[in-house]
Image (cartoon, grey):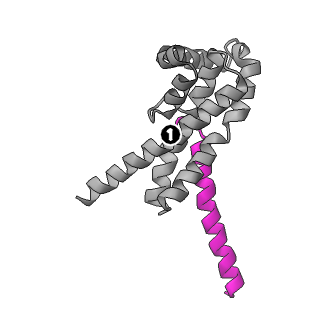
């Protein structure tokens, strides 16, 4: 195999890993909470590369989701097939979003930044729609929350590495 073919093969492998991290971090539930540790521990990415890719992927669906929920939010609950899921999700978000009710914009930032299930960018878009945030204000709050969540997950990952090495 010539040098050019080896280089192309290397790039394909290299870019496949990045795309996998971006896709995983864009998925609901997993988001960057799974993508970051996977990038660092499975793919041996640096913390900075894992952080950037995870953040990028986690932010990608936010604006389209905000627009979608802004226009179709209440009609989703009435759909036969998916209505039960959306009712469950919306009620769950309402129950867990006391911080947003109390603190508004900064509450949404903190809600998204908490690296636990049923918090994060996807649920933050639902919460923003529930509390009637403007798309611009919600987008900024969710991006700030995702950036903070990335920091929390990075620190947790560093802690895991230190424990592992003990």
Residue at the outermost bottom position: 2
160 left or right of 93?
left
- Vertical placement of 133 versus 114: above or below? above
Is 13 magenta? The answer is yes
Q: Is residue 89 above or below residue 41?
A: above
Percent x, y of residue 73: 70, 17
Q: Which residue is mark 1?
A: 148
Q: Is residue 77 magenta?
A: no
Instruction: Name the residue at the left extreme.
Output: 166
The quadrant holding residue 91 is top right
Judge the density around disc 1: few (<14), some (14-19), many (≥20) Cα neighbours within 10 Å: some
Q: Nearer the viewer, residue 146 or 16?
A: 146
- Quadrant holding the C terminus: bottom left
Tell me what residue is drawn at x 55 percent, y 16 percent: 88
Q: Please state which of residues 163 and 74 is positioned toward the viewer in this rendering.
A: 163
Number of residue marks: 1
Locate the N terminus and report the quarter of the image it occupies. Answer: bottom right
Instruction: Report helix, strand or loop for mark 1.
Output: helix
Report the front residue among 124 and 100: 100
The boundaries of the magenta stretch are: 1-29
């Amino acid at each position: 195999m010539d040098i050019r073919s080896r280089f192309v093969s290397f790039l394909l492998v290299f870019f496949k890993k990045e795309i996998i991290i971006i896709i995983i971090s864009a998925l609901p539930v997993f988001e960057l909470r799974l993508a970051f540790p996977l990038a660092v521990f499975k793919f041996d990415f640096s913390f900075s590369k894992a952080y950037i890719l995870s953040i990028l992927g986690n932010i990608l669906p936010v604006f389209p989701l905000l627009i979608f929920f802004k226009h179709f939010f209440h009609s989703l609950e009435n759909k036969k097939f998916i209505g039960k899921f959306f009712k469950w999700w919306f009620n769950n978000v309402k129950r867990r979003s006391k911080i947003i009710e109390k603190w508004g914009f900064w509450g949404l930032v903190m809600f998204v930044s908490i690296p636990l299930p049923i918090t994060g960018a996807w649920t933050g878009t639902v919460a923003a729609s529930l509390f009637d945030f403007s798309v611009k204000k919600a987008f900024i709050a969710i991006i700030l929350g995702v950036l903070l969540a990335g920091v929390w997950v990075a620190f947790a990952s560093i802690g895991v590495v230190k424990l592992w090495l003990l």
